[in-house]
Amino acid sequence: MSKGIIVKCPMCKTSVKRCNEYFPFCSPRCQTTDLGNWASDTYSIPDRSDAQPYDDDEGQPVIH
Ligand SMILES: [Zn+2]
């Protein structure tokens, strides 16, 4: 039986043994990073890349 299964960490591509506590990640850091990516994907805002910065300089002279 092969109990020494090794996979690549999804985050940093480091070889990870199946017995690793954080399998399939190599470390708690990579595990947390992946969860963070997943969360940000889930809550990603619909395409707003076209949104332009608000332009408050429309040629209106400010009268004091
Ligand atoms: Zn890793």
Image: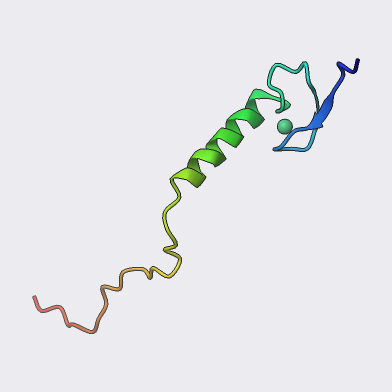
Residue 9 percent coordinates (x, y): 75, 33
Coloring scheme of the render? rainbow
Q: Quadrant of residue 27?
A: top right
- In the rendered image of this protein, does residue 43 appear above or below residue 15? below
Quadrant containing the C terminus is: bottom left
Give the farthest residue toward the right. 1
Residue 4 percent coordinates (x, y): 87, 19
Q: Is residue 36 above or below residue 53?
A: above
Number of callouts: 0
Quarter, ligand 1: top right
Side of 26 where 35 appears, left or right:
left
In the picture, measured across the screen, residue 50 lies left or right of residue 38, that is left
Instruction: State the residue at coordinates (70%, 16%).
Output: 21
Q: Please determine whether, in this image, residue 22 is positioned above or below residue 47.
A: above
Quadrant in the picture for the N terminus: top right
What residue sits 25% from the left and 81% below the top? Answer: 58
Decide which of 33, 41 is in the foreground and name it. 41
- Picture residue at 78% right of the left edge, 37% below the top: 13
| Identity of the residue drawn at 42% across and 54% down | 45
Q: Is residue 24 left or right of residue 62?
A: right
Furthest toward the front, the residue is 1
User: Percent position (x, y) of residue 19?
Assistant: 77, 16
Is 44 placed left or right of 30 in the picture?
A: left
Placement of 44 over or under 31, stated as above or below:
below
Q: Quadrant of residue 28?
A: top right
